[in-house]
């Protein structure tokens, strides 16, 4: 499938201090977001994340990393994440173990100061909590409702990214619909069947799928176990605007 990719590093990447593979980079149809899969070795050299025009979401898949800005310091482990607003001089470093992470980067064209410009690193950090899921009400599911847990959005100062974890129960899914934004799923656990236009496929752990804005699609968990997804919407829709429109091919 054109819009489904499995995260895999280049041959020999494990021997490099930092191995970075662009999963969805400058795709002609997906211009709003760049997603890199990064392998950071234990003694890796510091990597600066500073940008005047890009905000980021760092999500740790395995291992641990450290982030530093001046005297401010945080450590991220598997299932931890950090929102990196533009114009922040944050440095990422390896720890005593290698780490795998997703680096989601979104260009920002605004000239005003970032709403999160002055937040401490500890206020930009979060962790997925299995007890913090809530029923998703923005778009009705087929079968048991999705459960979601917010990671970042405009409430914490993001100017474009809305990201959350989705828990898809067996027998549940979303029927045909479209979004006014680009959407990405990364499968953290389980499997998910997807339909994108006339193309269909089955995703498993480590797969990433892109749903371009305006592309009719659907998804379902046809297995016996729950599926856990990292969901990224770019850009977040304005307050009061619908984020999903159901499609009925029989009407």
Image: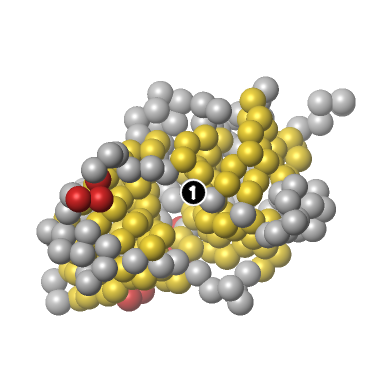
Instruction: Give the left or right position of residue 137, taking residue 212 as reference.
Output: right
- Snapshot quadrant of residue 71: bottom left
Q: Mark 1 sits on what residue? A: 206
| Residue at image coords 21%, 64% | 42
Instruction: Give the left or right position of residue 28, taking residue 164 as reference.
Output: left
Image spot of residue 136 (x, y percent): 69, 59
Q: Residue furthest right?
A: 250
Q: How is the image coloured?
A: secondary structure
Q: Is residue 19 visible?
A: yes
Task: Say which element carries label 1.
Answer: loop
In depth, the one of 55 and 11 nearer the eye is: 11
How many numbered callouts? 1
- Snapshot quadrant of residue 93: bottom left
Image spot of residue 6 (x, y percent): 46, 40
Image spot of residue 112 (x, y percent): 29, 51
For label 1, the crowd category at 10 Å Cα-Cα, with few meaning under 14, some 14 to 19 and many 20 or more, is some
Quadrant of the rendering where the C terminus is positioned: top right
| Vertical order, 109 against 157 (above or below) | above
| Residue at image coords 70%, 59% | 225
Q: Is residue 55 visible?
A: no
In depth, the one of 88 and 151 nearer the eye is: 151
| Residue at image coords 27%, 74% | 74
Instruction: Give the left or right position of residue 47, taking residue 131 as reference.
Output: left
Image spot of residue 192 (x, y percent): 65, 46
| Vertical order, 44 against 55 (above or below) | below
Quadrant of the rendering where the N terminus is positioned: top right
In depth, the one of 173 and 119 nearer the eye is: 173
| Vertical order, 161 against 180 (above or below) | below
| Vertical order, 117 against 236 (above or below) | below
- Snapshot quadrant of residue 147: bottom right
């Amino acid at each position: 499938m054109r819009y489904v990719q499995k995260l895999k590093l280049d041959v020999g990447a494990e021997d490099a201090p930092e191995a970075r593979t662009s999963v969805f980079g400058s795709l002609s149809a997906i211009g709003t977001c760049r997603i890199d899969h990064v392998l950071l070795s234990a003694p890796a050299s510091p990597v600066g994340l500073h940008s005047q025009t890009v905000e980021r979401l760092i999500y740790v898949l395995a291992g641990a990393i450290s982030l530093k800005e001046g005297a401010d310091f945080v450590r991220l482990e598997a299932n931890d994440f950090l929102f990196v607003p533009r114009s922040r001089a944050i440095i990422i470093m390896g720890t005593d173990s290698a780490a795998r992470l997703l680096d989601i980067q979104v260009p920002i064209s605004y000239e005003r100061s970032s709403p999160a410009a002055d937040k401490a690193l500890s206020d930009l950090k979060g962790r997925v909590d299995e007890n913090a899921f809530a029923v998703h009400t923005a778009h009705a599911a087929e079968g048991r409702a999705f459960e979601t847990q917010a990671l970042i959005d405009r409430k914490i100062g993001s100017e474009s990214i809305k990201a959350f974890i989705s828990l898809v129960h067996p027998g549940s899914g979303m029927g045909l619909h479209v979004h006014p934004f680009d959407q990405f799923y990364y499968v953290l656990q389980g499997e998910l069947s997807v339909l994108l236009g006339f193309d269909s496929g089955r995703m498993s752990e480590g797969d990433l799928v892109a749903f371009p804005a305006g592309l009719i699609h659907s998804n379902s968990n046809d297995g016996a176990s729950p599926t856990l997804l990292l969901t990224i919407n770019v850009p977040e829709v304005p307050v009061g605007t619908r984020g999903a429109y159901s499609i009925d091919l029989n009407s």
